Amino acid sequence: MDPSEVEFLAEKELVTIVPNFAQDKIYLISGDVGPFVPSIPLQVPLWMAVNLKQRQKCRIVPPEWMDIEKLEEKKQEEIDSKFFTAMPSRFYIEVTQLLLQCATDDIPRADEVRTLIKDAWDLRIAKLRSSIDVFVKSDATHAKLNFLTLMEINAGRPFLTKALDQMHLLRSNLTGGGVRATQD
């Protein structure tokens, strides 16, 4: 799964908007949305919120977890723990990127939010790489990592699979199980 596919899944997350137009309920395959009443908050899928914002039909209300104080607490919790901690959203990085691309004016202290999310991402990816390194060196057959998001798993997957392939190749050559070239 590549990052665009993970972003596609993230776009199904519900966010709150404040529409500036009136419209009856919209019937979608994934569920009904609406009715849209000016100045009355409403939950819609992220993809719809982005589309409406781009057309200047709404204001997006940032998720509760996108508060600076909550993000600073989450970052500190991640620093203090040697294990992964639960993130406020399973698509925190994707939701943040999409909202900051189209609705920076709706997010208070958007630059600080961007920095804190990036810091949390960097901390978690460093932990993931460290965990992969320990796993590969330990000669273990399986590992359990809690609270990783889909994007984080996809970020570590190429490194882990290549490392395991190389370890397998080295071990098979060491034990004589490698392919030997024959001379005629």
Image (cartoon, grey):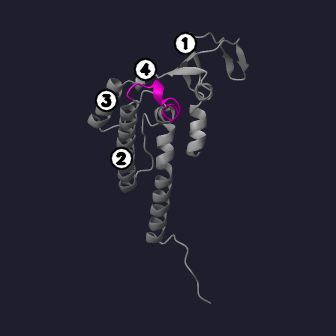
Looking at the rendered image, the disc whose residue lies closer to the viewer, 2 or 1, is 1
Q: In the rendered structure, which segment of residues is drawn in magenta?
A: 98-109
> In the current view of this chain or complex, which residue is farthest to the bottom?
184
- Category of crowding for the residue at label 3, using alpha-carbon neighbours closer than 10 angstroms: few (below 14), some (14–19), many (at least 20): some
Say what amino acid the circle numbered 2 marks.
Answer: Ala
Can you tell which mark lies on residue 126? 2
- Category of crowding for the residue at label 1, using alpha-carbon neighbours closer than 10 angstroms: few (below 14), some (14–19), many (at least 20): some
Q: Nearer the viewer, residue 74 or 170?
A: 74
Compute the Cα span from label 4 to label 2: 26 Å
Task: Report which residue position mark 4 lands on.
Answer: 64
Task: Report which residue position mark 3 lands on.
Answer: 72
In the rendered structure, which disc, 4 or 2, sits on the residue that comes first in sequence? 4
Say what amino acid the circle numbered 3 marks.
Answer: Glu
In the rendered structure, which disc, 3 or 4, sits on the residue that comes first in sequence? 4
Task: Report which residue position mark 1 lands on.
Answer: 41
Q: Quadrant of the N terminus?
A: top right
Please tell me whether residue 90 is drawn above or below residue 162 in the rendered image. above
In the rendered structure, which disc, 2 or 1, sits on the residue that comes first in sequence? 1
